[in-house]
């Protein structure tokens, strides 16, 4: 599960706990065009099923970026 959150404001989970809980923390302050493109590449290359949870602002930034580059829908096995 990709978890979009203000991680600096809360205690970050340890890498072991994130692994056990199957969480990939995504810091929404870092959602630049470069980091969004990197995230998209990771999502495309990982064939496992995925889930996302987070603030609407983070998904809005991603959608605006995809609109900016005239992206086709991303096939990434999102559930």
Image (spheres, grey):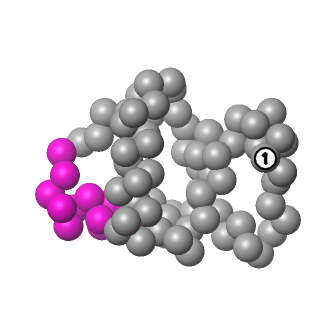
x and y percent of residue 44 in the render? 37, 36
Nearest the viewer among 27 and 15 is 15
Is 57 included in the stretch rendered in magenta?
A: no
x and y percent of residue 55 in the render? 57, 63
Nearest the viewer among 5 and 8 is 8
Q: Where 11 falls versus 2 (above or below)? A: below
Q: Residue furthest left?
A: 70
Look at the image and tell me whether residue 60 can be seen. Answer: no
Residue at 47% across / 68% down in the picture? 31
Q: Is residue 24 left or right of residue 14?
A: left
Q: Is residue 25 left or right of residue 59?
A: right
Residue at 18% across / 45% down in the picture? 72
Q: Residue furthest top?
A: 48
Residue at 31% across / 33% down in the picture? 75
x and y percent of residue 24 in the render? 64, 46
Q: Secondary structure at mark 1?
A: helix
- Magenta residues: mostly which secondary structure? helix
Q: Which residues are magenta?
A: 60-72
x and y percent of residue 21 in the render? 78, 36
Q: Badge 1, how many Cα within 10 Å: few under 14, some, many 20+?
A: few
Q: Where 10 falls versus 42 (above or below)? A: below
Look at the image and tell me whether residue 38 can be seen. Answer: yes
Residue at 43% across / 63% down in the picture? 35
Quadrant in which the N terminus is drawn: top right
Where is mark 1, residue-wise?
A: 15
Give residue 68's quadrant in the image: bottom left
């Amino acid at each position: 599960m990709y978890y979009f959150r203000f991680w600096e404001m809360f205690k970050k989970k340890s890498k072991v706990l994130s692994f056990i809980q199957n969480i990939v923390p995504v810091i929404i302050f870092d959602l630049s065009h470069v980091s969004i493109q990197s995230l998209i590449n990771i999502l495309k290359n990982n064939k496992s099923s995925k889930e996302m949870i987070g603030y609407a602002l983070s998904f809005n930034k991603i959608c605006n970026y995809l609109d900016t580059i005239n992206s086709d829908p991303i096939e990434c096995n999102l559930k």
